[in-house]
Image: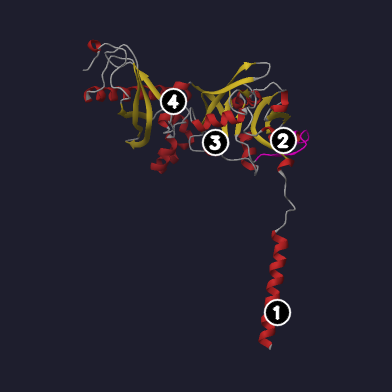
Amino acid sequence: MTKGYLHSSRKILLILLTWSSLFVLSGCWDRVEINDLAIVLAVGIDKIEDDQIELTVQLAIPSQMGGGKQQGSGSGGQGNKPTITKKASGTTIAEAASILQQRVPRRIFWGHNEVIVFGKELAGSGIREYVDFFAHHPEPRLRSFIFVSEEKASTVLEVIPNIEQSSSQFARELARFQIGLKVTLKDLLKNISGESRAVALPRLEYEFDNLNEKKGGLNINGTAVFKGDKIEGYLSDKLTRGLLWVRNEVHLATVSFVPENEERYMAFKLLRSNTQLHPEIKDGKWKMTISITTEDDVIENQTNMVLTDPKVVAELEKQLAGEIDERIELTLKKVQTEMQADVLGFAKAFAQKYPDEWDQVKGNWEEKFTEVEIEVTSKAYIRRLGMSTKPQGIPEKELNEE
């Protein structure tokens, strides 16, 4: 009977514990409905007078974010816009956000933010202290894409695109398409305190088809190069392409050039590419060898060349590799000699292979970086010659088959 009593007591106690745990696990006391949130899709930060910053947020209008409507192109006013922008100023982002919250009837939620844009003037004075907000706040995504605006960041967020639903979505898709650099908040936080103390960010510009309605589009226009946390200068689209080759981040590329002994262009589309950095320190001299292997397709042939001879293809591969080398060398000259900003990844490569030697120069890496000897060696392989190996519209007697 004692055993039965103990068994029953344990059973009752287990039931009581199970039921009591349900009261703890089923709590919804801190639940927040989506209708109570002001969802941030993009953030713009500009420097204004009196040493203050202007914070612009692009907020989603949930009732207008459905996929069944073409947003931003109607004439019904704000009623059919999928987003709205709000602004506030302060000495810090946190202060501006607090002031902004007073003007929005819902709790501002940063967890869906996908784009952060720094205005031109702010980027020129330094971005480190403003990046800190996004590093400390628990809600912003580390995967948010970072851009520098050619002018004010607020204007970028106010653009109503003709294609995508909002400027934040437009900028996000540009980053994912990897036309230029793709830099996330995580990348920025890592690089701004990394070995080289240099950062490269995509430069975002806007254009209006209709200025009064702020309808238009966005595009990536080169790269902003930072030393420390301040802009040192800009790279054009062409030089940005060379930067992408060196950083092994090139995904979409078309190379066009006039082959030797020809008068018209031939164009090649990138299939895949691989770049490796080989640092070397010998007899006190620092050297970096950049080895690139690229595979391409012929997508346009304006010349008289017939691409059936393996010797012709081999010569084109050699010339294609030379074109890539030339583009990279232009970028190296700009970055290494003029800007003296290592956005190429050299510092990390030397630090990993030669940690002792790196410790001796890391304090003055900007100076040492300019002294590094650089050698570029590219190999190009033409994989496919196109639907036709002969140029179109040219008489047979004018074709060059040698």
Q: Please name the residue shown 58% across and 27% down the image.
A: 148
Q: CA distance from mark 3 to mark 4?
A: 19 Å
- Amino acid under label 3? Thr
- Amino acid under label 2? Ala
Q: Is residue 229 visible?
A: no
**To which residue does mark 2 refer?**
97
Look at the image and give the residue range highlighted in magenta. Answer: 100-110
Which of pointers 3 and 1 indicates the residue nearer the eye? 1
| SS class, disc 4 | helix
In the rendered structure, find residue 241 and report the number of the disc placed on it. 4
Q: CA distance from mark 1 to mark 4?
A: 75 Å
Q: Earlier in the sequence, mark 1 or mark 4?
A: 1
Q: CA distance from mark 4 to mark 2?
A: 37 Å
Q: Nearer the viewer, residue 82 or 352?
A: 82
| SS class, disc 1 | helix
Considering every residue shown, the one lying at the far front of the view is 68
Q: Earlier in the sequence, mark 3 or mark 4?
A: 3
| SS class, disc 2 | helix
- Say left or right for 206 vs 251: right
Q: CA distance from mark 3 to mark 2?
A: 22 Å
From the top left corner, tell me how far across and down residue 107 is, in percent. 74, 40
Considering every residue shown, the one lying at the far bottom of the view is 1
Q: Earlier in the sequence, mark 4 or mark 2?
A: 2
Residue 302 found in image quarter: top left
Q: Earlier in the sequence, mark 2 or mark 1?
A: 1
Q: Earlier in the sequence, mark 3 or mark 1?
A: 1
Q: Earlier in the sequence, mark 3 or mark 2?
A: 2
Q: CA distance from mark 2 to mark 1?
A: 57 Å
**To which residue does mark 1 refer?**
9
**To which residue does mark 3 refer?**
184
Q: Is residue 45 magenta?
A: no
- In this rendering, the answer to whether 131 lies above or below 4 is above
